[in-house]
Image (cartoon, helix red, strand yellow):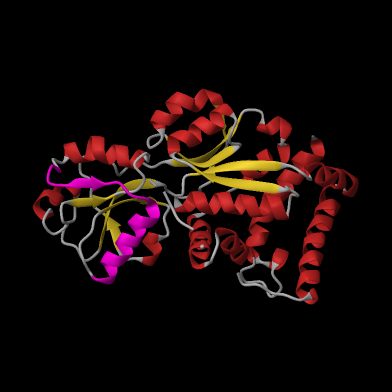
């Protein structure tokens, strides 16, 4: 499980600007036709000046969701400003629990974040699972290394330099590796190196480039499994792998009442593995996460905006938010 990373094509001139405004206006008008023009006009006007703060741990899927939410809430739902605040896992749970954060979108349950859920679960609201694939953890290696199982690692400690390259020290996966995997497989010849998800992925990329052995803490969903020929080490004792997780968003208590549109939007988000992977790769290839989201939304569209195939994917989430605002 995870901490992660982020990255314009700019078109200038009145023609491009007019088209962008036209497409955005078209989105509002289509929503008005669908849900009732008078009600939607009122609900959109009501969102002007609204702000939202979304916590972000930095894991790739969390970066993707947080910045997608920011772009949609600001561009399609009229929010003045959505702030993405990067924090450690404990501070994210604590922030949503005490109301200083409106949401955190990357909660892994029932296992990885169980200690945080036990502490803060009764103080937050958990939304429906948003990921439609299999989420799990493991120790990963490139295909070319000889080790096949975590049980093999003691025999290969020299080749791996006695290091397991980890992610953020507060991540649930790090605690599982340190407290269960390492003692369970007698990995006394190894040191777990805390890092960040971006640094871990950079180390993995460098090792693969030079065909050097490396073992890292990794998780699915993660775009690395699509880009590199890597695999989980077998885990015969079941200390880290073989436990599939659900991915949830949590929001502060009261969000549904005072910002029903944001609540409905966050609760409507659904991603398949391929859709999420494409969004993550678009963000990695862009200069900023926001630009990556825009590129992903406009993919396969000759004009951008709502003609993009991925904008069609998110449109029902937008419609759910507008309907909630209309009913409020």
Residue located at (9% from left, 52% from top): 155
* Image location of residue 99, percent across then percent down: 60, 30
Residue 296 to residue 233: above or below: below
Q: Is residue 316 visible?
A: no
Residue located at (29% from left, 71% from top): 209
Q: Which residues are magenta?
A: 187-210
**Total number of numbered labels?**
0
Asked if residue 308 lies in the magenta stretch, the reply is no
Looking at this view, name the residue that lies furthest to the left: 155
Q: Choose between 63 and 142: the one closer to the eye.
A: 63
Residue located at (38% from left, 60% from top): 224
Q: Choose between 222 and 94: the one closer to the eye.
A: 94
* Image location of residue 202, percent across then percent down: 35, 61
* Image location of residue 1, percent across then percent down: 38, 46
* Image location of residue 288, percent across then percent down: 55, 62
Looking at this view, name the residue that lies furthest to the right: 38
Asked if residue 209 lies in the magenta stretch, the reply is yes
Q: Is residue 5 visible?
A: yes
Q: Choose between 10 and 138: the one closer to the eye.
A: 10
The C terminus: image quadrant: top right
């Amino acid at each position: 499980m995870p901490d992660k990373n982020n990255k314009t094509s700019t078109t200038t001139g009145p023609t491009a600007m007019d088209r962008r405004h036209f497409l955005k206006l078209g989105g509002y008008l289509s929503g008005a036709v669908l849900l009732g023009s008078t009600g939607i006009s009122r609900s959109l006007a009501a969102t002007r000046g609204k702000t939202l703060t979304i916590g972000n741990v930095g894991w790739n899927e969390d970066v993707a969701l947080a910045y997608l939410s920011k772009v949609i809430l600001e561009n399609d739902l009229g929010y003045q400003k959505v702030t993405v605040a990067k924090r450690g896992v404990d501070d994210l749970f604590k922030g949503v629990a005490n109301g200083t954060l409106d949401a955190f979108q990357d909660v892994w349950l029932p296992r990885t974040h169980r200690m945080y859920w036990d502490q803060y679960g009764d103080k937050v609201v958990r939304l429906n699972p948003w990921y439609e694939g299999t989420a799990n953890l493991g120790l990963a290696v490139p295909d070319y290394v000889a080790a096949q199982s975590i049980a093999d690692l003691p025999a290969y400690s020299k080749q791996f330099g006695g290091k397991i390259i980890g992610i953020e020290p507060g991540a649930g996966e790090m605690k599982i590796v340190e407290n269960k995997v390492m003692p369970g497989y007698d990995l006394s010849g190894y040191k777990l190196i805390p890092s960040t998800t971006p640094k871990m992925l950079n180390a993995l990329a460098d090792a693969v480039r030079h065909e050097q052995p490396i073992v890292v803490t990794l998780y699915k969903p993660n775009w690395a499994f699509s880009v590199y020929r890597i695999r989980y080490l077998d885990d015969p004792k079941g200390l880290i792998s073989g436990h599939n997780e659900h991915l949830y968003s949590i929001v502060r208590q009261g969000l549904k009442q005072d910002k029903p549109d944001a609540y409905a939007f966050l609760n409507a988000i659904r991603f398949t593995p391929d859709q999420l992977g494409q969004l993550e790769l678009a963000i990695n290839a862009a200069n900023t996460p926001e630009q990556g989201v825009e590129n992903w939304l406009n993919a396969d569209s000759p004009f951008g905006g709502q003609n993009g195939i991925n904008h069609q994917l998110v449109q029902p989430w937008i419609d759910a938010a507008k309907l909630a605002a209309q009913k409020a």
